[in-house]
Amino acid sequence: MAQNRASDAALLTPREMGEADRLTIAAGTAGIVLMDRAAAAVAAAAMERFAAARRIALLAGPGNNGGDAYAAAGNLLRAGRHVQLFHLVSPEKLSGDAAIAAAAYHGPASVLSGFRPEGFDLVVDGLFGAGLSRPLDGDVAEVVARLKAAATPVLAVDLPSGISGETGAVLGAAIEADATITFFRKKPGHLLEPGRSHCGEVVVADIGISAEVLGEIGPRAFENRPALWRERLVLPIEAGHKYDRGHAVVFSGGASQTGAARLAATAALRAGAGLVTVFSPASAIMVNAAHLTAVMLKRCDDAAELDERLGDERLNAFVLGPGFGLGESARAYAKAVLAAGRRLVLDADGITAYQDDPGALFEMAGDAAMAPEDAEPTLVLTPHAGEFKRLFPDLSAAEGLSKLDRARQAAARSNAIVVLKGRDTVIAAPDGRAAINPSGTPWLATAGTGDVLTGIIAAQLAQGTPTFEAAAAGVWMHGKAAEFFGPGLIAEDLPAMLPRVFAELAGV
């Protein structure tokens, strides 16, 4: 993948963002210049996104976020807005670039304890940014409570005060912003819940930091959007035929549990697999046959029959779990697929089947890894929080771990790509790469949508897309399909939206 494309999607921890600032300053751009550019972006966002706001309060903290607020207040004052700045510490106690910005501000200012949101059209939150590491208390906590009770819109600088830039956690209390303006690149806290819900619309401003600094920083977290994986995605070409696009297989449950497998199979076909077959027990053949058309159907009653079918090397991507049922069959099928070197998406019952011995699954995944020299996994796990707890109870219960940390550690332990689902789905690889997904709607929280996701991922695997990129692309496509459909979504609606998703990708 071209580095410049992936770098567009990079997420920076607060420490990494500090390093980006340091490298830029070391290269000859003064820190106060960066602050002035950031302040200009804040003022522009305030005037563009809240154009009717004439009376603007700016809240200034003790660090560089406070410096941004002072400088932005000056810009807004010169633009004709009625400005009042409220500071947490007196200007004389500031240092560095923040002190320079405060000294240059000659507008109205008073102490933060006197701030009341009533009477203002907009509040600019410049109290604390992404690097906050302790809970808010005292006057700041009181300000959060006042803002929560008021209807005054809030524009946050970098991150809403009280949100951890690294984990997205609320530290004691946090401001709920209508919009957030950050600089150079987003932080994980912009995308991880509950931070994501506190940010509102997130705007990334260019303040003159070169993307070249990312080569030295080496970020390992990304926003999951096409810039991350588009160049690795394998899509149909004019000269290709269906056998070039892979053959995905979905295992069906018994006669009363066939719907989930068909959802996954239909999604796999719509998502680009050249051929899709449902492997069904004999008891469910007639039920499945009554509903399938372009998706093919074959009997598979036990591991011995599966071993025989695995002799066809064209079957290259499998889905096991949706509606399959619990028990030894799930474990035997997973073992057979991994032992044959095929790629497997394991979800739902397939995950739960290993809750008493997850180590056995992780060992098989390690043994089955494709191209051991670069540790390309063959297994994709797609748990929701409850299923994640069954395989990784210690990680689920560990305090202080963000969702990003949990997924990364789970991926390293399981030798698999882990897709930890939710509004802030995280896709993590054993080598430490991780992506946080921005697409989707609350309407995805309904039965069967996870089965569709497994099929979309399997289709990318079948076509030969590398495992991490296949999972990341599948998650993004799934979310975009939901966005295109809108309210009232049920799982059956998602596959029909995939042509629109591919049309959008074609323009990326």
Image (spheres, rainbow, N blue to C red):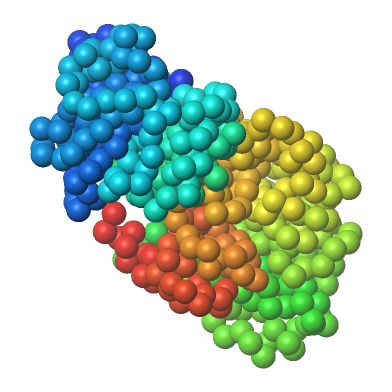
352 and 336: which is toward the camera: 352
Question: Can residue 322 be seen from the camera position used here?
Answer: yes
Q: Quadrant of the C terminus?
A: bottom left
Q: Please state the horizontal and vertical placement of residue 342, each as a whole percent of the image.
A: 65, 52
Can you give x and y, in whole percent of width and height, for residue 367 in the image? 73, 38
For residue 181, above or below residue 50: above
* Residue at x 74%, y 70% (from the top left corner): 323
Image check: 262 left or right of 28? right
Would you say 415 lies left or right of 361 here?
left
Q: Is residue 445 above or below residue 229?
A: below
In the foreground, 57 or 6: 57
Dividing the picture into quarters, in which one does residue 239 lie?
Answer: bottom left
Residue at image point 70% right, 84% down: 288
377 or 128: which is nearer to us?
128
Q: Residue at x 39, y 31 (%)?
A: 114
Choose between 395 and 410: the one closer to the eye.
395
How many numbered circles does the render carry?
0
